[in-house]
Structures are given as C-alpha cells and as structure tokens.
C-alpha cells in the first residue's frame, strides 16, 4: 500500500507540473491526466469517466492575469489517485461508493489546491527578491529552476495529504448507501454544462446554441435508434 | 534563427512560468529565455541587443506578465535586431497579448476543445451504456490534446521566430490572427454548449426512468435536472461556487439517499 501511495503521489506530482511549471501542454487537464494515470495502474476506463465528469466542473474558473483559479487539475489527479488506492486497498470494492468519495474529495482538493498554489507563489516571491540588476546569470537560472522544486513540493503535499486523508476515512465507507453510476455523474455534468453556458454570450450567439441543441437531439435519436 | 536556436527557444518557452511569483510574475522566465537565446557579442545594427542590455532593461521594467502562449512573440521581439525592447511601447505589448491571449486560449479554445472531448466520451457512453466498452471513444482525450498542443505550441514557436525576424510587425500579425478567430470560437462554443445542454439531461432521464416511455418519471427527472441546471447557472457567477456546488450537491444527494 505504501508503495502504491508513493507511486501515485510521484506520478501525479510530475503530471501536475504541466499546470504551470512546465509547458502548459494540457496533459494535467483531468480528461487527459485521469485516464493516463489510470492506464499506468490498469484503470483506464475509470480514469476516463472521472476525468470527463470532473473536467467541465471548473471550466469557468480561468487563470486570467494574476488570478489563481480553482485547482481543477489537482482535483482530477487526486480523484483518480484515490480511486486506484481504494480499489487496491478495499476488499469490498463497491465502485459507486468509491466514485462518490472521489468526487467529494476532488471538490475539496480544488479549494485546497488553490490555497497551496497561492502559498507556492508567495514562496517564489521570496526567491524572486534575491535577483537584482547585478545578479549573475547563474543565480538567475538557479532561482528560476528552484520554482520547479516549489511546484513539485506543492503537488506532493496536495496529493499525499488527500491519499492519507482517504486512508483515514475509508473505514466509514461501509456506512454509505448504494448509488448508481448514472446518479452520481449527473450533478458534476450539470454543473459543467452550466459552466459552459456561462462562457457563452447566449443572446449574441443564440442561433448557434439552437443549432447545437438540435444537433444534440439528432445525436441522441441516432444513437438510440 | 536556425533550427538549434528554435529548439533552444522552445525549451526556454516551456519553462517560462516555472518560477511565476506575485511580484516578479514571468520576469525570471523571460530572463532565462534571454540568457539562453540572446547573443553575447556587443551590439551592432545586425546583431540585436546583448544579453546584459536586455537583462538590465527587463529588470528595470520589472514584472513582466502576459498569456503564456504569446510569450514566444514577446521574447522574439526582445531579440529583434531593431532593439524593440528599448522602446517604451514594447512593455505595453504584454497587456495586449494578455487580454487577447486570455480570451482566445483560456476563455474559448480550451473550454471548446475540452467540451468537445467530453461530448465524445458521453456519446460513447450513450451508445454502449458501459464506460468500459466505449471503443473508439476512448481516444476522446486526444481530441482535446492534439489540437491544443498543435495550436498553442505552434503559436509559441512561430511567435518567437517571427518576432525575432520582423520585430513589432510580428506582434501585429499575431494579434490580428487571434482577433479574427475569436468570433468563430464564440460560435463554436455556443454550438458545443447547445449539444451539452440537451445531451446531459437526456442521459440523466434515460438513466433515471429507463426507456423514455415512463412519462411520469421522465417529466420528474427532466424538471429536476432543469432546476439543478438553472440553480448552477445563476450560482456560478462567483468564482469558487463550482466547488461548493459539487460538495454541497453531493452531500444533499447523500442525505436524500439516507432518507
């Protein structure tokens, strides 16, 4: 179990570096990160469900300017890590109960991740203040890449603490009622759809929204025929 | 700019936000890129500004910050032989790139591609009713990832190359190019939203009442989902609400289940 926790924390932390420290290629987005981590541990499909469902919840939380958005990437990685740990740890694998806990802890992780990101950037401030016009190139490069370390530490703390939290509360899972996957996934998907609706200037693009609605209906009919 | 310089430039851009801080923002990333890319020789008409000149200039106008995908053009222009970085207007470019870049990448491109990928996963689910057997739709994450990497990293590298070659004109090309695409992306996002808004309730209704023949249950499910959607829409005006909605919603759901 300890090896699984360490592996999950390390893999998740490195993937989360894509959030800001390295590249911002989009690998840390839940719809990519969750199936990717799931694939490593043999839970690709579960990763894809969790990633897709969690993806849109925070779609309206944007990193505009210096604003720190809610940590949707951290939430995704925490959710799939908990799922993998739970399936390894629990003898009675009630997958629906595990998904419920994953979604709940992902919601909390998005808030904790935001606070940790702010703290990390405050630490980076201290490092930045060591640089001035007379600083050598070596010092600038060293200070710059220390940022990688602060990001990695932030990610380790986030994922590690939630995995430990899960282990602590996992005995309580047997008291949860039974759910179905369909019931569980609808709330996050509805929040996601509302989030997307927020990004669209509906009055200005009503025609395209209506075309989308018709396309959705046609898709449904075609798939159900 | 040769191939090796472009690769070095790409590496510099990849690590540009590594040390992002509230005071310095992207400044150290810019300095690192300049250290990696600028020439050491003394300045001449054809060689562009030297490292130390750019470093001094950046640190004097401390706190650079713009959209990360537009930083290639900013660095390219700083390296330009005409010495754009010594003109005051150079530093105002970051605000223009910031607003246009944020609108294009964060507000439109990323949500649009992510939603499209989610829709493909949902289509797979509707088709099979089993997430483990969604076949070809398991490649949905690539539907987001590949175009996103291609567009964002392409703009980064192209901006660097053109900025170094054409100076401020490259910024004008890039800004105009992004601005032209914004209305199209707005329409795309509206279209995607339309699909999501209808597909999600249908999935729920189908799960809740089985075939949509059970009229009473279907009406109840549709009404419930519309209420949750409207509440979410109005509640999402505040930044942190999406997390609170998820947590509180799940807890209410749990209480209902217990009852």
Image (tube, coloured by chain):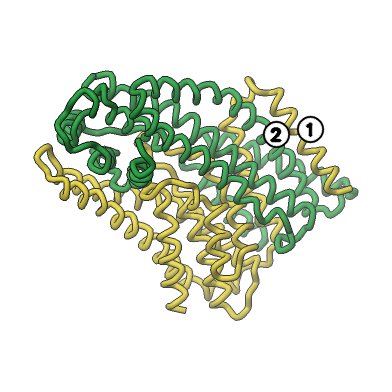
Chain colours: A yellow, B green
Q: Position of residue A83 (x, y in %)?
A: 56, 67
With A215 as the anchor, is B107 left or right in this view?
Answer: left
Numbered disc total: 2
Q: x%, y% of residue B61?
A: 20, 28
Residue A13, above or below B238: below
Residue, far bottom = A91
> Which residue was labeled with disc 2?
B194
Q: Are marks 1 and 2 in contact (CB under 8 Å)?
A: yes
Residue drawn at x 28%, y 51% as measured from the top left: A147
Question: Residue A168 location, x and y as percent?
Answer: 45, 73
Q: Chain of mark 1?
A: A
Secondary structure found at label 1:
helix
Who's the residue at 64% across and 49% down the image? Answer: A187
Q: Is residue A32 above or below residue B153?
A: below
- Residue at horizontal 59 percent and vertical 45 percent from the top: B144
Label 1 neighbour load within 10 Å: few <14, some 14-19, many 20+: some
| Residue pointed to by mark 1 | A214
């Amino acid at each position: 179990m300890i090896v699984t926790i360490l592996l999950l924390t390390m893999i998740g932390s490195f993937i989360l570096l894509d959030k800001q420290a390295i590249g911002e290629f989009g690998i840390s987005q839940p719809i990519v990160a969750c199936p990717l981590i799931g694939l490593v541990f043999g839970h690709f499909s579960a990763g894809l469900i969790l990633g897709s469902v969690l993806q849109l919840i925070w779609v309206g939380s944007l990193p505009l300017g210096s604003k720190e958005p809610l940590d949707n990437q951290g939430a995704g990685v925490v959710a799939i890590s908990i799922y993998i740990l739970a399936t390894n740890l629990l003898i009675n694998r009630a997958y629906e109960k595990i998904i419920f806990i994953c979604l709940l802890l992902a919601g909390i992780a998005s808030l904790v991740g935001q606070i940790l990101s702010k703290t990390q950037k405050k630490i980076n401030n201290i490092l930045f203040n060591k640089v001035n016009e007379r600083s050598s190139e070596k010092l600038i490069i060293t200070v710059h890449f220390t940022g990688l370390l602060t990001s990695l530490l932030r990610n380790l703390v986030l994922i590690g603490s939630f995995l430990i939290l899960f282990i602590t509360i996992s005995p309580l899972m047997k008291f949860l009622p039974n759910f179905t996957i369909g019931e569980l996934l609808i709330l996050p998907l509805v929040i996601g759809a509302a989030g997307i609706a927020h990004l669209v200037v509906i009055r200005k693009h009503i025609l395209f929204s209506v075309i989308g609605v018709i396309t959705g209906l046609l898709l449904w009919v075609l798939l159900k025929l | 700019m040769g191939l090796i310089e472009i690769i070095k430039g790409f590496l510099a851009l990849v690590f540009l936000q590594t040390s992002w801080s509230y005071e310095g923002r992207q400044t150290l990333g810019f300095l690192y890129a300049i250290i990696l890319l600028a020439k050491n020789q003394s300045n001449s008409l054809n060689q562009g500004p030297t490292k130390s000149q750019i470093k001094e200039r950046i640190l004097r106008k401390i706190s650079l910050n713009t959209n990360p995908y537009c930083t290639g053009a900013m660095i390219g222009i700083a390296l330009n032989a005409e010495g754009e970085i010594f003109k005051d207007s150079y530093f105002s470019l970051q605000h223009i790139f910031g607003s246009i870049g944020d609108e294009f990448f964060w507000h439109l491109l990323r949500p649009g591609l992510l939603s499209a990928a989610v829709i493909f996963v949902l289509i797979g689910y509707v088709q099979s009713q089993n997430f483990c057997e969604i076949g070809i739709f398991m490649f949905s994450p690539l539907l987001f990832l590949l175009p996103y990497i291609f567009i964002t990293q392409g703009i980064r590298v192209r901006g660097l190359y053109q900025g170094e070659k054409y100076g401020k004109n490259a910024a004008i090309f890039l800004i105009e190019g992004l601005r032209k695409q914004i209305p199209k992306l707005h329409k795309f996002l509206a279209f995607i939203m339309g699909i999501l808004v209808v597909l999600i309730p249908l999935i729920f209704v189908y799960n809740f009442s089985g075939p949509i023949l059970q009229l009473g249950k279907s009406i109840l499910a549709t009404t419930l989902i519309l209420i949750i959607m409207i509440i979410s829409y109005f509640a999402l005006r505040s930044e942190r609400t999406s997390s609170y909605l998820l947590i509180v919603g799940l807890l209410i759901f749990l209480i209902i289940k217990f009852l």
